[in-house]
Structures are given as C-alpha cells and as structure tokens.
Image (cartoon, helix red, strand yellow):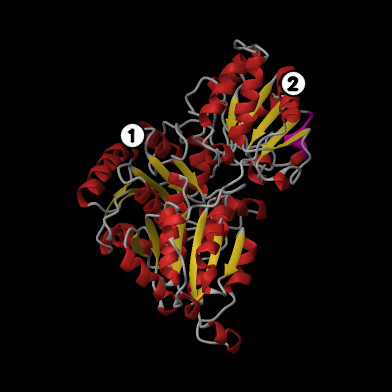
Amino acid sequence: MPAMNAVVHVLKDEGVDVAFGCPGAAILPLYKSMEELGGIEHLIVRHEEGATHMADGWARTNGRVGVAIGTSGPAGTNMITGLYTALADSIPIICITGQAVSTKLHQEAFQAVDIVEIAKPVTKWAVQIKEAAQAPWIFREAFRVARSGRPGPVLIDIPVDVAKQLIEYDPAIDAALPIAAVEPHLPRVEKALDLLLAAERPLLLSGGGVIIAEASAELRELAELLQVPVQVTLMGKGSIDEDHPLFSGMTGIQTSQRYGNASFLESDLVLALGARFGDRHTGTLDVYRGTRQFIHVDIEPTQLGKVFEPDLGIVSDVKLFLRAILDLAKRRGVSRTPSSWVDRVRELKRTLTRREDYDDIPVKAPRVYKEINEFFDEDTYFVTAIGLYQIWGGQHQKAGKPRRYQVCGQAGPLGWEIPAAIGVKKASPSSQVVGVVGDYGFQYLVEELAVAAQYNVPFVLIMLNNEYLGLIRQASIGYDEMNYQVNIHYDEFGTDNVKIMEAYGCAGRRVFDPAEIHDALEWASKESARISRPVLVEIMIEREANTPHGVSIDAVREFEPVP
C-alpha cells in the first residue's frame, strides 16, 4: 500500500480522530491517504502555529496524542513555538511536516529547510523518514515517545518522494508499542511515608504531573487519610477541588493566594508530586526552601535536583507512587484526624484573602473572576495564556476538576487561547469551553477564529482589555515605572474587537460596568450555542492596575487594600 496509507492506519489505531493542519505540495501524499481512508476529521488552520496549539488543547483535554500537519519550509518553522509550548508543559503532540525531494535537500530546493535540526531543542524526538518502509514504525515509535515518561512533542519530517512510495504493511496484525510503567522503589516510598508522618506541618504539593497521571483521586485519598493540606501549582490547578476542606491554595510570587504563601512558609515538609519548581512558583530559593524538608516525586529522573536538591527524590509515575504510599499507610494502620496544623491552615484560608466584590468603573479585574466563578460550573473547560490576566486568574479563579483549567504555564505564547479552545472543544464537543484572553494577545492568532466559524466550533471568549501590554507595563515598575512602548490605546478604545469578531462571522459585546458582566456572560453562552461559533465578552478594565507580585514568597506586594 502507499506508505502514507500505512501512516493513516497507525494514526487511527493510536486514537487520532481529528487533525489540525494546512496542506501544501510536499505533504499532499498524506492528505491523499487521509481522503481515501477517511476516519480522521481535518480542520484547515490559518497558521501552522495555530495547528500546534489546537493539537495541544485537544491533547490536554483527553490525554491522547494530538496531531498537527504542515508542509515543507515555513510550515515547520511556524510550528516551533507550539512544539516549545508542548515540551514545556509535558503535552504529547506529533507535528508532521512535508519535505522537498530527498535528493534535492543539499541543493537549496524550494522550501527545503532542515526542520529536524531546528526542532530538536523543543521536542522529545525529531526525525526524518529516509526510507518509506520505516514510515509505520517511526510513527509507532513517535506515539510511544510522546506518551512515555514525561510526555512531550515529536516532529516527523517526510520527504515527498519517500511519501509517494509503496510498502508492505498489514494493519490487521499491528498494534501500539508498549509503554513501560515507572514504578517507585519501595524503600523510598517507605522513607517518604516516615518523613510525612514525622512532620508536624506537612503539605502536599500537586503539580501538573498529577493531572497527566490521572492521579487526582489518589491525591485526595492520601490527603484525607493522613489529614495533610494540599496546595497546587499553576499547572496542577484543578487536581483537587478548591472548595475541598484540605485545599490550602497556591504558593508563588505571582499566581498565588495570600493564605497559600502563608501556609507554605509555616510548613516543615513538602511532598511535591509531579511539580518542576518553576521560578514563578518558588521565587527566591533561600526563602522557598527555608528549613523545611522536601520530597520530590517525578517520572523524569533528570527533574530531581534540577532546581535544588531534595531531601528525598523518588522516580515514579505519580499515580503509582500515590497508590504505593496509600497501600503502605493502610498496611501500617495509619489513619489521622484533623490536627492543629489543619486548623491553622483553615484559619489562614479564612482570613488572608483578597477582595473581589468591587463595583468600580472601570472594572477592577478581580470582579471579573468573581463573576466567572459564580456563572460557570465546575465542568466548564477554561483556557488562558500569559499576561496580567493569567496572574489574576491564578489568584482568583477556582478550578474543581482536572483538565478543566488549562494554561500554557512555562512558555507563555501570546495568542494560545483561541486555537487551544478549538482543540478543547473538538476533544469534548458537549462541554462548555471558555477562553480568558487579553486584548493584546488576542490579536496574535486571531485568524483562527475563521477555523472556528468554518467548522462551527462554539466557545466563549472573555477579554480583559486595559489597552496596554499590561504585564510589561507592570514589569517596568522596577525600571522607574518608565511605561515605555507599552501603551496600545488609540481612538476611543483602540482596536474594535467586537467588529473583529463580527468580521469573522462571530459575535461580541463590550462591557463597561461590572453590574453588566453576569448578563453578558449569560448572553454569550446562549449566543455561542445558538450560532455555533465563538462569542466575545470584552470587559474594559482599569488601565493601570497591577497584580500582587514580588521576588520572594514572603514579600509579595499588594496594590489594593486587603482584609
């Protein structure tokens, strides 16, 4: 059969039922096979970076491997930001690129670029298929690599002459490659439990690895069995219901709660589960570490000791570690009632809050998240990217279930939300999907609204518009508040984002008064369902508001009065 027919059979067998891409001459053999065999829905993107973020959102939602497709040359280079984003956040995607004829690659053929070498720093594996007979096996290995250990992206480059060849392949007797389970070493599990039980003020720190490992139930069970408060990182948000009695917030120098930082600073042991100790979480390391002990559990061995040396490192799938420590605790007969430490954390949570019930005009951002929390239910999927609104979201927005709060946490590419929302909606068509965006980043990949409109992909966009590069304006406080080249205001309120929505066949509404937010969200939810397209609620917020932030977790500056 044609080599690309074999590839399509592998894609389908590995769970791919939708792909995001843009055809070009060098990748047409794959598209021909997709057309002939069927079974994979395809959305034509307007930019290849958009395809990668769609595949990313799709994979974050269902845990499978997302697929983005492009042709040769600039199609591949346009995918680099998306590959970096997926690598940084441990998201399994495969980017497939076409390539010029293999015999012409050394002759500077049209759109011939060494995309494999370009992509290597931002992938788990980048490979070019040099022999057609390798095609199904390289794709099988790509899925194994993307899923195994710490998940991440793979790029496969296919010269067009290789793609056109015939090979021997029988899909009826083929199957996915096995993925080895990463079990914890039991003596280290025993040591972890000993340390946890000996601590007076322990915390569980749930990172993105808990969500990837589908280990939220085990996390909650351990917390309840041992009565240990639980914090989350930004990537771990949603791994435990934030209304759970043992939830104790987020620690950090930006996306954090006051009570989260306070309870962390009073802790004497932290059991970190699938967390990478990102700099916006830790802040200054000497303050973060203090005299407390750290146990670090991660499936990727090289993560242990990367930021600082833990008192105990454990290489393991987080779910398998939690099952092992639970089994050990039960065999020892361990069961605890709430302690004075639990009471202390609850008291901090009750008293160290930030205000949200503002009625000011222009709107103060925390009020937006108060309305979001009250209007949308725990099954709603949220996507958000980078800016002041990411920080406000981390501080104020609640998440009750895994995978429902999706954020590009490490790379932070502007424009991620619109394509990611498309991917999320395609992965979970019956779910409500909401993108929370800023006015500047919104325009980076705004052309992907055309994809949502063409294929009837409805979701709600909530924009916090301050007509600034707000996060950079805030960062300039440390440079004598220079405010240089960060103001994007012009005319009445800058770019007319409602008209942009309408130009793409979508809809939008602008809000100036906080009292109007609830009704606008209700309208947008109904309207997006009615027209089966994205709908925008643009909220004009206070232009020069700052988020609480600092350089260490014991010195976060508040810019508004606190209770």
At 65% from the left and 25% from the top, the residue drawn is 325
- Which region is colored magenta? 286-291
Magenta-colored segment: predominant secondary structure: helix
Q: Which residue is mark 1?
A: 375
Determine the image quadrant of residue 347.
top right
How many residues crowd around disc 1 within 10 Å: few (fewer than 14), some, or many (20 or more)? few
Q: Is residue 100 above or below residue 283?
A: below
Q: Secondary structure at mark 2?
A: helix
At 77% from the left and 42% from the top, the residue drawn is 308
Residue type pointed to by label 1? Phe
Determine the image quadrant of residue 18.
bottom left
Q: Is residue 190 above or below residue 458?
A: above
User: Looking at the picture, how far across and down is residue 78, in whole percent?
Assistant: 50, 69
Q: Which residue is mark 2?
A: 194
Query: Considering the image in quadrants, where does the N terminus appear?
Result: bottom left
Q: Secondary structure at mark 1?
A: helix
User: Looking at the picture, how far across and down is residue 54, in whole percent?
Assistant: 42, 56
User: Looking at the picture, how far across and down is residue 32, in whole percent?
Assistant: 35, 72
How many residues crowd around disc 2 within 10 Å: few (fewer than 14), some, or many (20 or more)? few
